[in-house]
Image (cartoon, grey):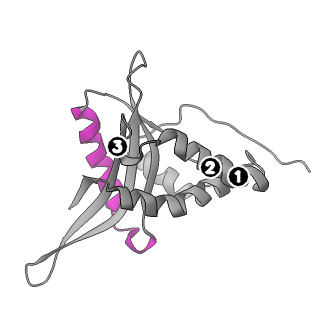
Amino acid sequence: MVRLVPMAEEDLEAHLKQAVPEYAQDHVDAGNWTPEEALARSEKDFHSLLPQGVATPNQYLYSIVATEEGSMGDATKSKVGMLWFAVDPERPRPFAWVYDFFVHSEHRRRGYGRAAFLAMEEKVRALGLSRIELHVFGHNQVARALYESLGYEVTNLNLAKKVA
């Protein structure tokens, strides 16, 4: 069983230590940013979106917590990842925008990501919203396969070709 639990500030700080450089590298790999500017731009993006950390209004940050039954009937709970979405209430038709989603490598391929997204759908519906949107880098085939299997459809597509 998977639950989305409101993220603690210290969990966000720990996540940002790995998310900021990974996001920077994703933009370098996609050709959007130069290696020299990438880390500063990534830090700026995260800070502008989360100026008050987990208390930033309209930002929904969760730890993905898995509960597994042991052989003796006992249950263990583990934080297996995180999920962050936001809502812009100023839009004519507000929707949930997934900013970040991560399952720790040792917990991957066990269905936690799929379960977390299904749990997010319930939270989004409870907010009175009817749409979830996200961005995925083209080189992230594993994430794309997960999202497509959950019914997400391509709404925009940017293509590039390196010629030099």
Residue range in magenta is 105-126
Answer whether residue 101 is magenta in the image: no
Relative to 49, 39 lies left or right: right
The residue that label 1 is drawn on is 38
Secondary structure found at label 1: helix
What residue occupies the far left of the structure in this picture? 73
Question: Mark 1, residues whose alpha carbon is within 10 Å: few (<14), some, or many (≥20)?
Answer: many
Say which residue label 2 marks: 42
Which one is nearer the viewer's eye here, 83 or 114? 83
- Extreme top residue here? 92
In this picture, residue 79 sits left or right of residue 85:
left
Q: What kind of secondary structure does the magenta stretch mostly adopt?
A: helix
Q: How many marks?
A: 3
**Outermost residue, bottom side:** 72
How much space separates mark 2 and mark 3, taking CA atoms?
20 Å
- Amino acid bearing label 1: Ala
At 25% from the left and 27% from the top, the residue drawn is 128
Q: Are marks 2 and 3 in contact (CB under 8 Å)?
A: no
Residue 7: x and y, percent? 32, 54
Identify the residue under disc 3: 55
User: For the view shown, which residue lies furthest in the front direction?
Assistant: 52
Question: Does residue 38 appear left or right of residue 48 in this picture?
Answer: right
Q: Nearer the viewer, mark 2 or mark 3?
A: 3
